[in-house]
Image (cartoon, rainbow, N blue to C red):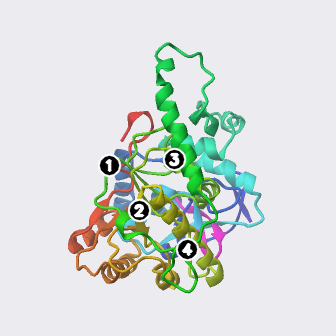
Amino acid sequence: MTKAKGISIRESRLISLDLLEPNSGQIEGVPANPRFLTDKRYKSLKKDIRENPDFLSYRELLVYPYEDRYVVIGGNSRYRALCELGYTETPCKIISTETAKSTIKRYVLLDNKSSGEWETTLLAEGWTQFEIDDIGLDIELPDLSTDDIFDNDDTSTEEDNTDDNEEEVEDDKQSFYQSMLSDCLYESNNIYDIPTLRLDMQAGKVILPLAPWGADSRLRKDISTYHFYVEDYRFEAIWKDPTKVLMSGVQALVEPNLSLFDTTPVAYGLQQIYKKRWIARYFQECAIKVYADLNVSRKFQEYNKLGIPDGYNAFFTRGYADRLSTLEEEIEIARQISGLDNPNLIVYGGGAKVHEVCARYNLVYVEQYMQAKKNGKE
C-alpha cells in the first residue's frame, strides 16, 4: 500500500468516468472542494490533456470509494475536463477506506494549494482558521455567523440609525415566514402525501443573478434566483430553518436538491422527495416562485413526478457531459408534465456537449461557473 501526502492508496487502475463524481461534500467529514480554476486556467488544462497523451498517466485522479461510486478527492477540474473532452475512463489512485477522514480533509487543501482560486465561504464552512493557517494559506476566513444578519455590534453611525423602518420591515418578514413554518399537510396528488406544487407560483424565465445557495455571503440581498445543486448538508440546514433563504430577498428558486442514486433505497428516496417538495411548497406559500427539480437517478424519475401537477412548466436540472441520454429523458418528462413540445426547462452546467443538446431542443443552458467569483473575478 503506497502513500500520497499521508494518504494510504489501496490500488491504482483505470476507472470509468460513469463511476466518478466530483467532491461536493457527500462524504461525512470531508468538506466540498473549495477551489476553482479561472476560465483561462481551465482552458489551458483542457489543452494539456488533449495534446499530451501521457498527461493522465502522471496526473492520476485521487478518488475515495463512496457507495457504488468514487468521489474525486484530488483532480476535480481534471475530472470535469475529461467529461467535456469525451473521455470514458481515466487512471485513478483509490484511497484506502482505512485512511482517516481528517487526513483526507487536509489533503483537499494541500492538493489545491498551488493553483486556482479559493471559494472562501466553502473554506469557512469546512475548515477552521487554525487548519487554514496550519498549511500556510494566507487567508482570513469570513465570519458566517447567522446572527450578523440581524445584529451588528459595530458602532452605529447617524446614517445607520435612519434604517429603523427597514429593520422593522425585515422583522415583519421574519415573523410572517415563521408563522407559515408549521407542521402542515399540504394537498397532494398522490398516495404518499407528497405535497403538490402550486401552478400559480411556478417560475418563469430565469431572473439574474443566478447563484448556488451558500457560494456567497448570506448577507447578500441581490441574488434573484437560487439553485441548490450543492452539497447535501446545505439542504439539511435549510430543512431545519428555511427562513434563512427567504430573508435573502430571493424572487425564485430551484427546489432544494438531494442526491438520489440507483443504490438509494426507495423508502429513503421517497422521504427525500417528500422533504424537497414540502419545502418547495412552503416557499411558494411565502410568495417565492419555484422550479421543479428533475435531477434524480433513473430509479427515482417516476417517483420524482409526484407532487408536480399536470401543466406545470418550470423545470431545472443539472447537466452532465457523460449522461446525455439522462438529460434527454428529463426533457421528455418536462414535455409530458407541461404538455408542451418546448417546455421551460433550464439546464445547469455540463459543458459544450450539454450545451449542444440544449440548442437542439431549444432550451436555456446556464454555464456552471457563470456566477461571480470572489474578489470580483469571473
- Principal SS element in the magenta part? strand
Secondary structure at badge 3 equals: strand
Position of residue 142 measured from the top left corner of the image (x, y, whole percent): 59, 34
- Mark 2–mark 4 contact, CB under 8 Å? no
Residue 35: which numbered mark, if any?
3
Q: Earlier in the sequence, mark 1 or mark 2?
A: 1
- Mark 1–mark 2 contact, CB under 8 Å? no
> What residue range appears in magenta?
59-70
Q: Nearer the viewer, mark 2 or mark 3?
A: 2
Q: Earlier in the sequence, mark 2 or mark 3?
A: 3
Q: How many marks?
A: 4
Mark 1 crowdedness (10 Å alpha carbons): few <14, some 14-19, many ≥20: some
The answer to which of 123 and 90 lies nearer the viewer is 123
Q: Earlier in the sequence, mark 2 or mark 4?
A: 4
The answer to which of 52 and 342 lies nearer the viewer is 342
- Mark 2–mark 3 contact, CB under 8 Å? no
Q: Nearer the viewer, mark 2 or mark 4?
A: 2
Q: Nearer the viewer, mark 4 or mark 3?
A: 4
The quarter of the picture where the C terminus appears is: top left
Mark 4 crowdedness (10 Å alpha carbons): few <14, some 14-19, many ≥20: many
Q: Which residue carries the number 4 mark? A: 273
Q: Amino acid at mark 2?
A: Val
